[in-house]
Amino acid sequence: MCGTGNRCDAMSLTKPNQDLKRDLQGVASDLKWSAVELMRIAERLSDAGFERDARELLTIIGSFPDAEDKLAGYADEVKASRISRSAEQKK
């Protein structure tokens, strides 16, 4: 039986939509990883006396969770067939 989170969900999507969903999830993951790395850089900047630069970087990083949530939401919309990609759109 197919339910939420099972492999059957992905199998009901067309290949272009599976790729789109995977791409959106991948970009969200990359963004999260980037935030972690940028936090480390901000810490080093602060330790080196560049407090203002560190704060500015932290401000930028602060917007990342909203962007991650948007990407995850778009991936959910692809899964629910509210957003789709035709075969011609994939490049």
Image: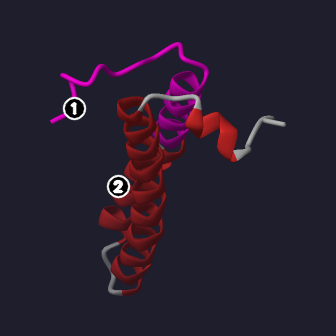
Residue nearest the observer in this picture, 4 or 28: 4
The picture places residue 22, in percent across and down from the top left corner, at 44, 45
Q: Which mark is residue 90?
A: 1
Residue nearest the observer in this picture, 1 or 68: 1
- Residue at the (44%, 61%) spot, across then down: 35
Categorize mark 1 by other alpha carbons within 10 Å: few (<14), some (14-19), many (20+): few
Q: Which residue is mark 2?
A: 56
The picture places residue 20, in percent across and down from the top left corner, at 38, 35
Placement of 26 over or under 13, stated as above or below: below
Extent of the magenta region: 66-91
Q: Can residue 73 be found in the magenta stretch?
A: yes
Question: Could you tell me which secondary element the residue under label 2 belongs to?
Answer: helix
**Is 4 left or right of 79, judged from the image as shown?**
right
| Quarter containing the N terminus | top right
The picture places residue 41, in percent across and down from the top left corner, at 36, 76
Q: Earlier in the sequence, mark 1 or mark 2?
A: 2
- Residue at the (54%, 45%) spot, across then down: 65
**Is 77 left or right of 52, judged from the image as shown?**
right
**In the image, what residue type sits under mark 1?**
Lys
Q: Give me the C-alpha separation between circle 1 and circle 2.
A: 36 Å
Placement of 40 over or under 53, stated as above or below: below
Question: Could you tell me which secondary element the residue under label 1 belongs to?
Answer: loop
Placement of 26 over or under 45, stated as above or below: above
Asked whether residue 58 is in view, the answer is no
Furthest-left residue in view? Answer: 91
Q: Which mark is residue 27?
A: none
Asked whether residue 26 is in view, the answer is yes
Furthest-top residue in view? Answer: 82
Q: Nearer the viewer, mark 1 or mark 2?
A: 1
The picture places residue 51, in percent across and down from the top left corner, at 37, 70
Q: Can residue 86 be found in the magenta stretch?
A: yes
